[in-house]
Image: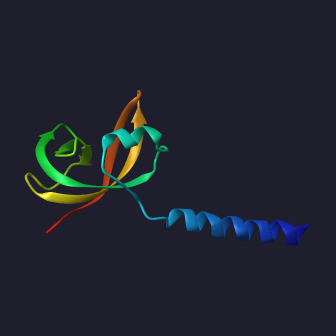
Amino acid sequence: MRRKAFALTILSLFVMSMLLTLPPKPLSSPYELKNLAQNQKLLIQGQVIKETISTNSKTFYLNNSFKINCPLPCPSFLYKNISALVTLQNYDNKINLNLLEIKENQ
């Protein structure tokens, strides 16, 4: 019985590590967000057309209608093409994209 439990534990750890290393899902339209799971990693690309600053975050508005929240301090990417790794969060039936990593495309 102990050998079966040990083997099952090792197998479960292996599966969990594989799930953590999955690549982020690329998105091209905000309409695709409704079918995705909470806390899923996503890859979003686009040009920042507007930035707004609130008390503790900066919001990037992209040309493909995505809105990304970045905790302060966050550099300015206004009028630049970016690739952003984000997580999908739902608060009060509102979809939020929280920034994990951002880089400027050349």
Figure quadrant of the C terminus: bottom left
Residue 87 sits above or below residue 3 on the image: above
- Display coloring: rainbow
Left of 47 or right of it: where is 33?
A: right
Residue that protrudes farthest toward the left in the picture: 79
Q: Residue at x 88, y 69 (%)?
A: 2
Q: Residue at x 19, y 37 (%)?
A: 55
| Image spot of residue 88 (x, y percent) | 40, 45
In which quarter of the view is residue 83 placed? bottom left
Residue that protrudes farthest toward the right in the picture: 1
Figure quadrant of the N terminus: bottom right
| Image spot of residue 30 (x, y percent) | 32, 41
Residue that protrudes farthest toward the top in the picture: 92
Left of 41 or right of it: where is 15?
A: right
Which is more toward the observer, 87 or 33?
A: 33
In which quarter of the view is residue 50 placed? top left
Q: Residue at x 79, y 71 (%)?
A: 7
Q: Residue at x 61, y 63 (%)?
A: 16
| Image spot of residue 84 (x, y percent) | 27, 57
Left of 10 or right of it: where is 97?
A: left
Left of 46 or right of it: where is 49?
A: left
Q: Tag count in the figure? A: 0
| Image spot of residue 43 (x, y percent) | 34, 57
